[in-house]
Image: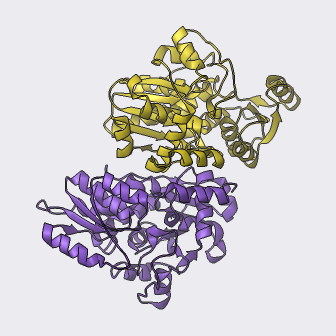
Chain colours: A yellow, B purple
Amino acid sequence: MNIADIEAAAARLAGRARRTPLLTSPFLDEIAGRPVLVKAECLQHTGSFKFRGAWSAISALPADTRGVIAFSSGNHAQGIAMAARLRGLPSVIVMPADAPKLKRENTAALGAEVITYDRATEDRDAIGERLSQERGLTLVRPFDEPLVIAGQGTCGLEIAEQAAEAGVKRATVLTCCGGGGLTSGIALALEARAPGMTVRTVEPEAFDDVARSLAAGQIVTNPALTGSICDAIITPAPGKLTFPIMHRLCGPGLTVSDEECLRAMALAFLRLKIVLEPGGAVALAAALFRGGELADGPVICTASGGNVDPGVFRTALERYGEG
Amino acid sequence: MNIADIEAAAARLAGRARRTPLLTSPFLDEIAGRPVLVKAECLQHTGSFKFRGAWSAISALPADTRGVIAFSSGNHAQGIAMAARLRGLPSVIVMPADAPKLKRENTAALGAEVITYDRATEDRDAIGERLSQERGLTLVRPFDEPLVIAGQGTCGLEIAEQAAEAGVKRATVLTCCGGGGLTSGIALALEARAPGMTVRTVEPEAFDDVARSLAAGQIVTNPALTGSICDAIITPAPGKLTFPIMHRLCGPGLTVSDEECLRAMALAFLRLKIVLEPGGAVALAAALFRGGELADGPVICTASGGNVDPGVFRTALERYGEG
């Protein structure tokens, strides 16, 4: 994979994906003690960056494709559902029964058939395999898929352009990291277009498979997959395609606490007027509260998604609404 | 005033003001029964469109200007404070003591000197006049000022461009309307750049001075100035400069209830991932819930500001967070 794949994805996404703004606030700069620039991917179609990779993959499928299938707890699901609808294809999403209600309902409302399973007792891959064979559906993986990584990389192309417009050439770029699709795509894009930037991953504490994998130089897994509010970025392990890219290009991984996420969500509400979900706020949380672990200079955060249940958002405002 | 004034303001604002996105959601289209496009001015610097007019005016002041003074309950105040700081000028804001806490604190944090007064017992204009004379400050009016109207009109230039990119040439454009600065600026811009669009104002019920003035063909006033959650757009009457422009170019004015605003805020949270204040949500509320009063076809709403106290936002989510 290289920059040409990302440029090709950008051509497919032109006029389909939104060019999301790079936002700033003097109040956030003051908290962080440095310039903070926020790439507001929560404003992307379906409320997360996932639409980029979904459309990148689905727009490249052959003309005789009968339909698509995906596994997802929510954001990839919505991206796939909307992209499939735009392409005029049926979509089936296999989703854990405990996925956030908002994400489940949105996926169905976007036209996908949602099939839920019990994470503890059922085998997701077996369900998917059976449906895929029965109906002739094409699987679109959430991150370990070149066309998806290339699609997410278009976010990196925009960061390079928008940061240059803002006069920022050297910066730490923090990504909200699950399986590494967004991170590896952005890292590839910036390697080519903004080599003065260093990408670093941010994960929830105790779900830091990427940080530990980067430190170990090989893929390691999370001991548990439940127990964080950051549902969007809890994955078992980095991908076989994404990990080598991250290992080659990224600095050490960072982690933040759930409380730091909630506070970052409240500050994004107050200072940027955007809605972030917990998993979409980890990068901003690290920028604001983990500055001691970052190199000097500006920090650019991806704010990767905003599909949060209203009750969780109210909790963030109750606890941290005063700043 | 004409399009040349707005183009000149756009030149002053280039690289200073944000080009805010025009957002859409299939969920909002379904509620409205038509395409809904939302100009997210809550993402402008200081959280409202007011920065446009403030920088338009302050950037045009002569070199020997000693400082600026403004009257505002909040959004104009923040716009002026930030614009004055960018120009290196001191600013004084005369603000009612019951202005929302967030707006008061932000204005001070942006470097302005905030002087509060009691709306019931004190004369705002007398306080301003005294301070202006004592310190040699230049008054920047919130809406009835050509440079401010021209600055707000840059929002209309962007709407014309972005709607054309989205393939929309004929539409109803709904504005959140207080004194009419944003409305008249947008109406002048669209008259020149997108003549297929009709601008219509939206106000809170019982604070519909603009709608009644448009109907009467002359300026009429609001009987009361308190009692709505839409603090940002409660003004005594349309301006002497803004009214003739609105009267010449706008269709009949619309009104919405406070509850409709709260529901629109919750839907903007759920579907667009943006934060709106009540006064910044009236246009979206009319698009979603007052379609029977609108001509057929797409509707473009200004979402004019997002400076809402967290408690009010929590109320919106508690009541309407399920959609």
Q: Residue at x 62, y 12 (%)?
A: A220
Above or below for B13 versus A155: below
Confirm whether residue A64 shows in the render.
Answer: yes
Q: Name above or below for residue B222 compared with residue A101.
A: below
**A100 left or right, relative to A5:** right
> Quick one: quadrant of the N terminus of chain A?
top right
User: Which residue in the rendered view is the most extreme toward the right?
Assistant: A134
Quick one: B77 or A242, which is closer to the camera? B77
Instruction: Tell me where residue A49 appears, x and y as whole percent.
Output: 57, 37
**Is residue B234 or residue A20 the one in the foreground?**
B234
What residue is at 47 percent from the left and 35 percent from the top? A284
Can you give x and y, in whole percent of width and height, for residue A145 in the image? 64, 24
Q: How many marks?
A: 0
Asked whether, in this view, residue A69 is left or right of residue A76, the answer is right
Q: Residue at x 45, y 46 (%)?
A: A323
Query: x, y percentage for residue B287?
Result: 60, 67
Image quadrant assignment for residue B106 = bottom left
- Does A181 sit above or below residue A165? above
State whether residue B11 appears in this view: no
Outermost residue, top side = A217
The image quadrant of residue B83 is bottom left
Give the image location of residue A114, x and y in percent.
80, 40
